[in-house]
Image (cartoon, helix red, strand yellow):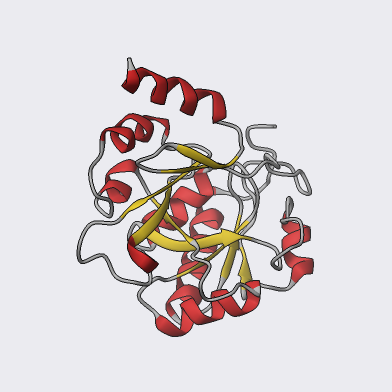
Amino acid sequence: MPESLNPLTENEVALAVDTAWAVLQRGGVVAYPSETVWGLAAVPDHLEAVERLYAVKGRAAHRPVQVSCQDARAALELARPSAALTALSVLWPGPLTLVTPARPGTPPTLAPGGLVGLRVPSHPLALALLRRCGGRLLTTSCNPSGLPPALTAAQAQDMALADFVLPNVQAAEGEPVGGQASTVVQLPEGTVLRSGPLDGAVAALLAGLRE
């Protein structure tokens, strides 16, 4: 993928992120690029925003979404410590989602049923959005439930799920993101719930714990 073929300037990128943050604060949903697939984001402490995220996704209320965080520290603050969590957190930022017991007191919107799904993306625009929004957002892939996720800004626009679609400043116009959803691992068991780009690295780190 080209490093930067998009003509947006640094100031234009900052303006786009500010616009996204304004939309999120009003209870809206924003589409954003990641290193895997395009995502949808909402502010976790805005109940109407959370309900809207589930509604546009068409996701059943009992199926939780993930919490995307600006860095590993922000993610680990929400989770009960475990050896497996510590070992796998070195793979952040990157295409890895860890489903793990939440710390006591974590809001139910972040950890329904006491479990939290944590992700730290590596895409620069996703990280810029997270930093602008205080470090954490509720996120899910940009697609109606049961359909393939958006891989380009045009696809995200055409799905009409978001109130605002961020540009993909890391790629040429129309160029797709990585295309493979993140590896999802259930902790503390280390069960892979969804195969993805980091399956091998996850297996190696967990094997190291058992040696």
Residue 87 visible in rendering: yes
Residue 110 visible in rendering: no
User: What is the number of callouts on the image?
Assistant: 0
At a point 25% along the width and 39% down the height, the residue shown is: 82
- Say which quarter of the image contains residue 54: bottom right
Q: Position of residue 37 (x, y in %)?
A: 65, 49
At a point 34% along the width and 56% down the height, the residue shown is: 135
The quadrant of the picture occupied by the N terminus is: top right
- Say which quarter of the image contains residue 92: top left
Q: Nearer the viewer, residue 130 or 207?
A: 207
Along the horizontal axis of the image, is 173 left or right of 98?
right
Q: What residue occupies the far left of the structure in this picture?
A: 104
Q: Position of residue 194 (x, y in %)?
A: 59, 43
Q: What residue occupies the far top of the structure in this picture?
A: 211
The quadrant of the picture occupied by the C terminus is: top left
At a point 55% along the width and 23% down the height, the residue shown is: 200
Q: Position of residue 175 (x, y in %)?
A: 76, 43
On screen, residue 151 above or below 22: above
Q: Nearer the viewer, residue 133 or 142?
A: 142
Along the horizontal axis of the image, is 72 left or right of 122?
left
Q: What residue occupies the far bottom of the structure in this picture?
A: 48
Q: Position of residue 103 (x, y in %)?
A: 23, 57
At a point 60% along the width and 32% down the height, the residue shown is: 197
On screen, residue 211 above or below 192: above
Q: Nearer the viewer, residue 66 or 179?
A: 66
Along the horizontal axis of the image, is 104 left or right of 146?
left
